[in-house]
Image: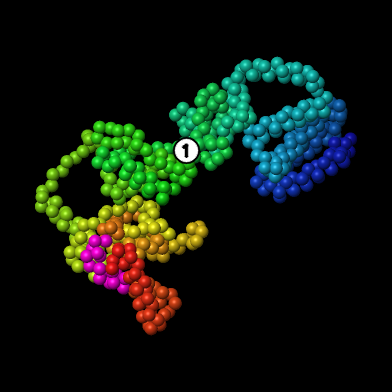
Amino acid sequence: MSFAAAASLVFTPAFIGSWAVFLAVLGVLSAAAPASRKPLAAAGLLLLASAVLLAVAALLLRLGVPVGSRAFRLCDAAAFFVMLIGVINAGGVCLFDLFLPRLRIRLSALVRDLILAVAYVCAALAALSSAGANLNGILATSAVMTAVIAFSLQDTLGNVLGGMVLHLEDSFSPGDWVRMGDVEGFVREIRWRQTTLETLFGEVVIVPNSALMKGTVTVIGSRGGRPLLRYREVPFNVYYDSGPDAVIAAVQAALREDPPPGVAAEPPLDCVTAEFQETHAVYKFRYWLSDLRAPGGVDAAVRLRIYYALSRVGIKLSIPTRSLVVVQKDEDVRERSRKHEAERRAAAIRGVDIFQALQDDEVRTLAERLAASPFSGGECITRQGAPGDWLYILFQGEAEVRIYNESRSSYQTVSTLRPGDFLGEMGLMTGEPRTATVVALSEVGCYRLDRDGFRDVVARRPELAEAISLVLARRRVELESARTGLSAEVRKQRLETEQGDLLSVIRGIFSLR
């Protein structure tokens, strides 16, 4: 028999048609699912391998091997099995990557592997049946073999069964944050034998599934379908010189108004008195962490906000008694330090244009009433639209002035404040809400002047109101003229009108005649 005649017996029209259809399907799937081209290429190679095996079968016929011989049937069954495996792989891509995702059904890798494994076993049985094998004998023998293998590989099977149970019960899934003993991290993957965790330090921990089934696993942040949050506490100590109400109010006000990134808005944060020690009270700031992978960084940001919030109201954190260092200074040194600070404060007052008309004694009075108000980098100093009856004078660091749109979805940076600059003068003098948001770019030191600290100064010399209103009015008119190009006559009229309006408001604010 010639090879062509033998090939015509093996490569039947049905096989050639199926082969052509399969190639076309592979091309369509490759275009529809580009991410699955690797398994589709493997399916194409399996199809080619089946053709090679059939060519070997044709060669056997050419050499005179009978059709019913064992060698021919093995080649034919092997070609059939390899082709079935390719079809199963292509069907898996169609099912798992195209059809089920359209139904919003996502199967885990373990379930996909299990379905494919069952399909492979069925393909093997079909190939053996086509080769004329006795399936009853094979199944009976395989049952005994299964029992022996199960006994010898009970640990491995325990891991596999554990993985199946984890998927079926859906106790946790990839992306969840879990803790098991001393290991804590997020679930990267659940496989047949093990579950892979990644810790905060970038370490990959492989945990056998049987250990997960036997041990206690804590799923952190699981809240019944709601956003994943984690409860955190940040303790701090304060001397008894400051009452709990003042401490709690200062901390809660600062962190509720401007929480660091990673602090969830809901459930609301709070501060409580935890316990009383011999020399200090222990407080705890309690909040919910929205970024489970960055607890240390968020805790550090919270500690900074607590420190600066307490510093702005003159409350000091306590230090352990064993670390207390007493330094005795010479009276001359202390006097020079006080004098230097007084001069710096007086210079800050003189640098504010609305205070140019103040006399030296008035400058010294205001300098004594300035309160140091430090801010950490990224902290909001003032917020656009918020009320405020105080003025800030920067003496350290830089801050950015931002103007937000109406929806507060975006902002424009208009200027950068540096030492010597000031903000909030309109709120101090007229009670107007803040016209911009100011955010500290680094650690910022400010002097804060409250309205009550300025009230008696302007009350003793009411004519100051006229000088201040003139400075504020001139600034407004100059800004308007820069935008619209007012003529000199219009500027003069607008200046008189603005000064009159501002003077009336200032007199009302400070109860002047």
Query: Residue drawn at (18%, 66%), measured in percent from left and top?
Result: 360
Query: Residue drawn at (39%, 73%), measured in percent from left and top?
Result: 479
Residue 388 drawn above or below residue 130: below
Give the side of residue 107 with respect to residue 183, left or right. right
* Number of numbered discs: 1
Image spot of residue 182 (x, y percent): 44, 29
Quadrant the N terminus occupies: top right
Query: Residue drawn at (51%, 28%), measured in percent from left and top?
Result: 217
Q: Which residue is mark 1?
A: 230
Image spot of residue 110 (x, y percent): 63, 33
Image spot of residue 52 (x, y percent): 77, 38
Which amino acid type corresponds to the residue marked 1 in the rendered image?
Arg
Dominant secondary structure of the residues highlighted in magenta in the image: helix
How dense is the environment of label 1, judged by Cα within 10 Å: few (below 14), some, or many (20 and up)?
some
Quadrant the C terminus occupies: bottom left
Q: Can the viewer see residue 7?
A: no
Give the residues drawn in magenta, as a range: 455-471
Q: Can the viewer see residue 169?
A: yes
Is disc 1 placed on a helix, strand or loop?
Answer: strand
Residue 186 drawn above or below residue 456: above
**Is 490 inside the magenta-drawn segment?**
no
- Examine the image and state in which quarter residue 5 appears: top right
- Comparing 411 with 155, the one in front is 411
Give the side of residue 366 with respect to residue 309, left or right. left
